């Protein structure tokens, strides 16, 4: 069956932490812990570019994959997630 990978969309780190605690989601806390090592990064909002780059690198090494796409959870708000997706779509079309 096709798989859609769920990722958090752009959000403040405080928002991600709130959701991680409320849901008991360990991986979200691990992302926050990684970012906490670099204090300057804590001031910037989280965006999933690094996660998507890792996913793209993984898919590039596979001839076939069950991963059919991604689902963006709009934890930082629908508008921020929509704008982020539109910007990435425009960038992708420009490169193609």
Image (spheres, helix red, strand yellow):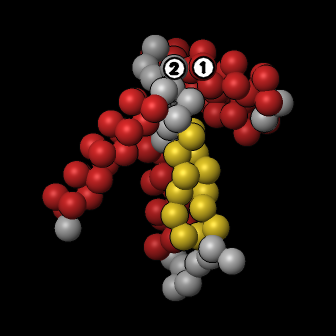
Does 95 sit above or below residue 75? Answer: below
* Residue 91 can be seen in this image: yes
The circle drawn on residue 33 is none
Dot 1: few (<14), some (14–19), or many (≥20) neighbours within 10 Å? some
Q: Residue at x 58, y 70 (%)?
A: 67
Say if residue 38 shows up in the picture. no
How crowded pointer 2 is (Cα within 10 Å; few <14, some 14-19, many 20+) is rated as some
Q: Are marks 1 and 2 in contact (CB under 8 Å)?
A: yes
Looking at this view, is 77 or 26 the one in front? 77
- Is residue 84 positioned above or below 96 on the image? above
Q: Is residue 48 left or right of residue 7?
A: left
Q: CA distance from mark 1 to mark 2?
A: 5 Å
Relative depth, front residue between 14 and 43:
14
Quarter of the view holding residue 32: top right
The label number, if any, that marks residue 15 in the structure image: 1
Q: Residue at x 83, y 30 (%)?
A: 24
- The residue under the point 57% across, 40% down is 73
Marking on residue 12 = 2
Q: Secondary structure at mark 2?
A: loop
> Residue 61: image x %, image y %?
51, 76
User: Split into 4 quadrants, where in the image is the C terminus?
Assistant: bottom left
Residue 75 on image: x %, y %? 56, 30
Above or below: residue 18 compared with residue 31: above
Rendered-image quadrant of the N terminus: bottom right
Q: Is residue 5 left or right of residue 23?
A: left
Q: Which residue of the protein is positioned furthest toward the front in this rendering?
A: 78
């Amino acid at each position: 069956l096709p798989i859609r990978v769920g990722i958090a969309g752009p959000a403040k780190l405080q928002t991600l932490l709130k959701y991680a605690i409320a849901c008991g989601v360990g991986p979200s806390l691990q992302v926050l812990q990684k970012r906490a090592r670099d204090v300057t990064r804590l001031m910037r909002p989280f965006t999933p570019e690094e996660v998507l780059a890792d996913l793209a690198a993984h898919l590039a090494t596979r001839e076939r994959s069950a991963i059919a796409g991604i689902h963006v959870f709009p934890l930082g708000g629908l508008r921020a997630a929509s704008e982020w997706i539109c910007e990435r779509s425009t960038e992708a079309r420009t490169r193609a």
